[in-house]
Amino acid sequence: MATAVEGLVTLVSRYGQAETVDRLIAAVTGRGAAVLTRVDHAKGAASVGMSLPPTEVVGFGNPRAGTQLMQTAQTMGVDLPLRALVWTDASGATRLSYNDSEWLALRHGAAGGHDATIKAMREFLAAVAAAATG
């Protein structure tokens, strides 16, 4: 695990881009959360005649956790649902990045009184990221 950007956790995947995304989605849904969105940034770039290495965001969540944090700090809604970015770097390695839940809660002033929720989100993110990347 490497953190080059504050609050961002990045893992290198043992799998290619498409398989990492598929494994992420399976891990998210297998743990009871819903996949709410997928954004293929490379496809969007191609649609305007530009190139971008494979770069896809998967948004997912469970309103039981997110709503509690938004009740404390409604601005958490800009960072929810949770998201993971699966991207291929310049060397051809597939990586998966996501925002650390504690960092998000601190960013929005929603950390107080939500230790269990933040811990559960952190553990959930770590588990689905590990399952996706091997």
Image (cartoon, grey):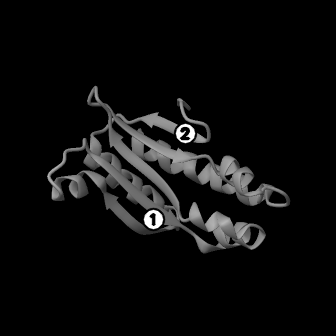
Residue 63 falls left or right of residue 37:
right
- x 56%, y 45%: residue: 126
Badge 2 vs badge 1, beta-carbon distance below 8 Å: no
Residue 102 falls left or right of residue 34:
right
CA–CA distance between discs 2 and 1?
21 Å
Which amino acid type is shown beneath numbered disc 1?
Thr
Which amino acid type is shown beneath numbered disc 2?
Val
Work out whether residue 35 or residue 102 is closer to the camera in this orientation and state it.
102
- x 25%, y 51%: residue: 42
Please tell me in which quadrant of the rendered image residue 3 appears. Answer: top right
Does residue 118 lie above or below 52 as drawn?
Answer: below
N-terminal-most mark, 2 or 1: 2
Work out whether residue 115 or residue 73 is closer to the camera in this orientation and state it.
73
Does residue 114 lie above or below 96 as drawn?
Answer: below
Residue marked by disc 1: 29
**For the residue labelled by badge 1, is the local secondary structure a helix, a strand or a loop?**
helix
Q: Quadrant of the C terminus?
A: top left
Residue 64 at x, y percent in the picture: 66, 73
The nearer-to-camera label among 2 and 1 is 2
Which mark identifies residue 9?
Answer: 2
Residue 111 at x, y percent in the picture: 78, 55
- Badge 2: residue crowd in 10 Å (few <14, some 14–19, many ≥20): some
**For the residue labelled by badge 2, is the local secondary structure a helix, a strand or a loop?**
strand
Residue 2 at x, y percent in the picture: 53, 29
